[in-house]
Image (spheres, rainbow, N blue to C red):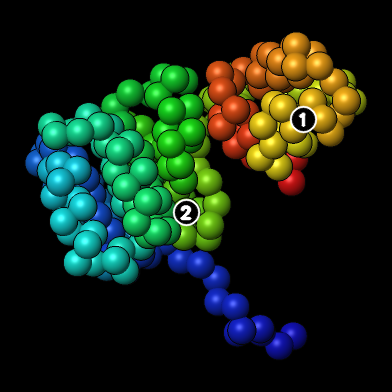
Amino acid sequence: MPVDLSTPPVTCQAARVLIVDDHPFFSEGLAMALRQSGCAEDIHTAASVYEARHYLARHQNTELILLDLGLPDAAGLTLIRGLTDAGLPIPVVIVSSREDEGTIRAARAAGAQGFMPKSAGTRELKRMITAILRGDLWFPTVERQQLNPLVSLTPRQQEVLDLLAAGLPNKRICQELELTGHTVKTHLKAIFASLQVHNRTECVLLARELGLVD
């Protein structure tokens, strides 16, 4: 059987990776793990959001950012917003010692492509990088396991969710479905409870991941 060489498989190697962490022991250890596992070709480190921004301004071809949340000059998530504002579509994976549900959801809502605990091993690191370079998201399955595996929405709630995912504000949803503002808020509250989310952004992101909306 002939082999199709037109679309080579994605490997776990990124040409250029930036590690943003203010603990040299961890960042150097992570860099060593990336090199030894063949996951990165060119690895650089930054100890603050300022250093990271300065580096990225000169190296916009960076393929992946591994970002800690607690940095000395600013919260790590501000770097993601800065990348979005600058129009730099560089995937960011949060690498954190905090593994609670709230931290994971905050990372997702801020626009991170993934989340990996600092306790993860080299094997998971390789799997994560392969997934991210392929364009997938990478978040702990523990968050999904806390959801009802059969998330059940009423037909009307599904319609509200579809319009929410399309970016419509509550007023437009009211107009489209001929509902009162109070009714739309009630449906949204029920949807948030079913998906165990706290805001519109989290709701849409998780609903897409679960295949509830396009």
Residue 99 numbered tag: none
Q: Quadrant of residue 87?
A: bottom left
Q: Quadrant of the N terminus?
A: bottom right
For disc 1, the neighbor class at 10 Å (few under 14, some 14 to 19, many from 20) is many
Three-letter code for the amino acid on which mark 1 is drawn: Ile
- Element under label 2? helix
| Residue situated in front as seen by the camera: 120 or 202 | 202
Q: Secondary structure at mark 1?
A: helix
**Where residue 75 appears, x then y in whole percent?**
25, 32
> Mark 2: which amino acid?
Ile
Front position in the image: 135 or 130: 135
Horizontal side of residue 4 vs 46, given as left or right? right
In the image, what residue occupies the spot 77% across and 30% down? 173
Left or right placement of residue 24 versus residue 177 in this view: left
Mark earlier in primary sequence (1, 2): 2
The reply to whether dot 1 and dot 2 touch (C-beta < 8 Å) is no
Q: CA distance from mark 1 to mark 2?
A: 34 Å
Residue at screen point 72% across, 27% down = 171
Tell me if I can see residue 110 in this picture: yes
How would you rate the neighbour count of disc 2 (Cα within 10 Å): few for under 14, some for 14-19, many for 20 or more? many
Q: Where in the figure is residue 177, as x and y percent of width and height?
A: 86, 29
Residue 198 in percent (x, y) is at 56, 18
**On screen, 75 above or below 45?**
above
Residue depicted at x 56% and y 23%: 199
Nearest to the eye among marks 1 and 2: give it: 1
Q: Give the residue at x 50% y 43%.
A: 138
**Mark 1 = which residue?**
173
Instruction: Kindly identify which residue carries mark 2.
Output: 132
Q: Quarter-wise, where is residue 86 in the image?
A: bottom left
Pick the front one: 90 or 174: 174
* Residue 18 as seen in the image, left or right of residue 23: right
